[in-house]
Image (cartoon, grey):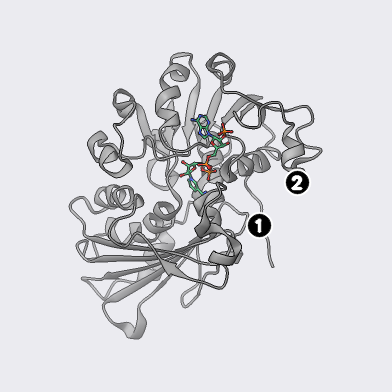
Amino acid sequence: MIKVGIVGGTGYTGVELLRLLAQHPQAEVAVITSRSESGVAVADMYPNLRGHYDGLKFSVPDSKTLGACDVVFFATPHGVAHALAGELLGAGTKVIDLSADFRLQDAAEWSKWYGQPHGAPDLLPDAVYGLPEVNREKIRQARLIAVPGCYPTATQLGFLPLLEAGIADPLRLIADCKSGVSGAGRGAAVGSLFSEAGENMKAYGVKGHRHLPEISQGLRRAAGGEIGLTFVPHLTPMIRGIHSTLYANVVDTSVDLQALFEKRYADEPFVDVMPAGSHPETRSVRGANVCRIAVHRPQGGDLVVVLSVIDNLVKGASGQAVQNLNIVFGLDERMGLNHAGLLP
Ligand SMILES: NC(=O)c1ccc[n+]([C@@H]2O[C@H](COP(=O)([O-])OP(=O)(O)OC[C@H]3O[C@@H](n4cnc5c(N)ncnc54)[C@H](OP(=O)(O)O)[C@@H]3O)[C@@H](O)[C@H]2O)c1
C-alpha cells in the first residue's frame, strides 16, 4: 500500500481527495493535517466519510510524520508547499501539490501574480506540470508534481489539438469560462454566500486573473511560440463545474476538426471527445475525473468554438492529483477514478 499524507484536509480539495482515495485499492491515508481542527475525527467533520476512515484524525503538520509517507498531497493555499516541500523531498517523499506554488516555471512571474517572493525557486527545475495529456512521461519520473488549476485544465485541453497542429491563429485566442462557487474554496467570503452567488452571474478578474500566466505558459508550449489570450472567468450559481467556451480562428478551413480532436485524445482515458454537434454539460462530469469536449465551426466559417467541461474539484484538482499519483507509482492510471459522473 502507498502511504499517503495530506496537508490541508479541511478545504474542498482535501475532502475530495479523501473521497476519491477511500475507493483507491493501493493507497492508504496515514496522515491528514489541519491546524484548526487538530484532534477532530475526519468522519465527525465530513459525515459522507463515515465508515471509510475510522480512527483517522486531523493533526498539526509535522514534517517528520509527513516525511514517513511515500507521497504527500498539498491541498493548501499558495505558499504552504513552498515552505515544506524541500524537507519532504529530502526525506525521499514524493510531493503532489494542488496549489499554484510550482505551476509557473518563472519565479519572477509567480511573484508578480501572487504578490510575494517565490518561496522555493531552487525546486523549480524538479517541478513537473501534472497535466498527463501533455507530460505523462515526465510525470512518471517526477518527485515534485504541480497539479494544474481548474480553469487551466479545461482551457488547455480544449485549445491543445488546434495549437499543436498549428491550425489556429495563436495570437487571437479567447477563453470565456464559467466556474461553480466551490472553485473559490471553503473559506468564508461574502461573494460566496448563497444570497450573493445564487440567482446571479458575474465576470471577474477581466484585467488579469492568476490562472492567465499558467494557461499562457501551457499554450506557448503547445504552439511552439508566442500566444495572445483573452481569458474572462465568470462565477455562476452552481456548486461544482467549469465550462470553458473557447474561440480561435483557423488558418486552414479544410481540416476535419472532429477527426483532429478524436485522434489527439484517442488514447486518453479521461478526455471524452463528444460526437460532432454536441453540447457537453457540467452535470455530466460532476464527481468524475473527465474532461468532456465538443468542437464546432458555426456556419462553416473560420471561427472554431470548443466547448470543454470539467468538475473543478475532480479533473480540475483532486482527481487529476490522484491520476498523477497513479502515473508516478506505475499503477493503472484509472485506478480509483473510473466512475461515472453524478446525474441528475
Ligand atoms: N477549490 C477548487 O476548485 C480548486 C481547484 C484547483 C486547485 N485549487 C487549489 O487547491 C488548494 C486548496 O484549495 P481549497 O479550496 O481546497 O482549500 P483552501 O481554503 O485553499 O485551504 C484550506 C486548507 O489548507 C490548510 N492550511 C491553510 N493554511 C495553512 C498553512 N499555513 N499551513 C498548513 N495548512 C494550511 C487549512 O487547514 P488549517 O488552516 O486548519 O491548517 C485547510 O485544511 C488552493 O491552493 C487552491 O487554489 C482549488
Front-most of 161 and 74? 74
Residue 54 numbered mark, or none: none
Res 99 seen here: yes
Identify the residue under disc 2.
48
Q: Which amino acid is tagged 1? A: Ala
Q: Nearer the viewer, mark 2 or mark 1?
A: 2
Dot 2 falls on a residue whose secondary structure is: helix
Please identify the residue farthest to the right as the structure is shown. 51
The reply to whether discs 2 and 1 touch (Cβ–Cβ < 8 Å) is: no
Q: Is residue 78 above or below residue 199?
A: above
Q: Which x, y percent locates residue 252?
A: 22, 72
**How many numbered marks, from 0 up?**
2
Residue 340 numbered mark, or none: 1
Left or right, 57 with reference to 133? right
- Ligand 1 is within 8 Å of the C-beta of the residue at disc 2: no
Figure quadrant of residue 1: top right
CA distance for labels 2 and 1? 18 Å
Dot 1 falls on a residue whose secondary structure is: loop
Q: Which amino acid is tagged 2? A: Asn
Which quadrant is home to the C terminus? bottom right
Res 141 seen here: no
Q: Is residue 310 above or below residue 255?
A: above
Q: Which x, y percent locates residue 43?
A: 76, 37
Front-most of 107 and 193? 193
Left or right, 208 with reference to 128? left
Figure quadrant of residue 82: top left
Please identify the residue farthest to the front as the structure is shown. 190
**Label 2: how many Cα within 10 Å (few below 14, some 14–19, many 20+):** few
Q: Which x, y percent locates residue 23?
A: 70, 40
Residue depicted at x 23% and y 36%: 108
Residue depicted at x 74% and y 31%: 41
